Amino acid sequence: MTIGDHFQEFHGLPAFDFPGLDDPTPDASSLPSPESVAWRIAVNSYDSDEQWEAAFGRFTAAVDTERVRAIVVGAWSDVYDSAPDEVVKALVAARDRLPALRALFVGDIVMEEAEISWITQGDMGPLLQAFPDLEEFGVRGGNGLVFPAVRHERLRKLTVETGGLPVEAVRGIAASDLPALVELDLWLGTSEYGGDADIADLEPFFAGTRLPSLTRLALHNSEIQDAICSALASAPVVARLEELDVSMGVLTDDGATALLTGQPLTHLKKLDLHHNYLSPALSTRLLETLEPAGVIVDTDKEDAEDDEDDDGEVWRFVAVGE
């Protein structure tokens, strides 16, 4: 699986690309109303003629930013070796001009611009501190990602999409106090691309004490998916979830069996296991056990396939790595 398309919507709003440098100069009459769309601001990811912060300057000059509800940061110049430090600075500097901002995503970058493992990220802490009224925050790319422990009173959804989520970022998120958070979505990735967290680092998510409002937990796209499922089998947080997502990773019968034979899952509205390495028998068992209770269960294997070497070693892969 690769990320081939930009957001079509974000925070319940249709995504709209703010015109580029070579497009006709925009004005209020040629643009949608500021609050009606999620504004995507981007430049060329390679040798751009314009820096992202300059594009953002054109945006703030053309749009009534006091009414803007959602911003999607697309590519900045040279994303493969340049962190978005200037992007972060520009957004923080504009915080007083964005009083209605409720959703922000950094890195809506597709494979033609840079593979997910090539995206150079930076410190997301200043953005969460600058925008205390954010309800949704997301970031794509784990290379160089810094996510310090924060307290944020209003954040309801946090998404971190990576081919490898660094352990220090995992620990920062795990140590954050997010009392309003309803949805947590972490793409943990693989050690090959910097995803070096282990089960002990995920323990705060299993306990859920810093996430009292959580109803949807996604710990997925992981090469340790079996171990995650084994831990979730007795994790206190599961009893209050509505949705549990352990998809996109290297999930085998071992992890799925542990999950199924652990604490009850019949209270869930949805259990997502798509992209998996489950046997037909185990998939059938999951469906027959949970669907009669009203749980929506996704066991679609999608494109997950074993790759066996000549010496008999079997290789399995997460959905999103490079």
Image (cartoon, rainbow, N blue to C red):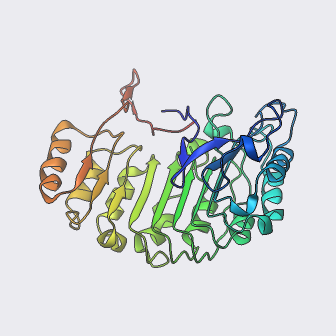
Q: Is 221 or 20 nearer to us in this picture?
A: 20
**Image height check: is 124 above or below 187?**
below
Q: Is residue 294 left or right of residue 202?
A: left
In the figure, 216 relative to 129: above or below? above
Q: Is 1 placed above or below 51 here? A: above
User: Would residue 11 appear left or right of 85 to someone viewing this image?
Assistant: left
> Toward the viewer: 189 or 23?
23
Most foreground residue, 202 or 106: 106
The answer, for residue 142, to whether it is visible in the render is no
* Residue that protrudes farthest toward the front in the picture: 29
At horizontal 60% and vertical 52% (from top left) the residue drawn is 36
Q: Position of residue 34 (x, y in %)?
A: 68, 54
Any part of residue 171 in sight: yes
Image location of residue 82, percent across then percent down? 80, 44
Q: Residue at x 26, y 58 (%)?
A: 259
In x, y percent, where is residue 271? Answer: 29, 54
In the image: residue 289, left or right of residue 223: left
Give the residue drawn at x 44%, y 56%.
219
**Could you tell me which quadrant the C terminus lies in?**
top right
Residue 80 x/y as whole percent: 74, 37
Q: Residue furthest top?
A: 310
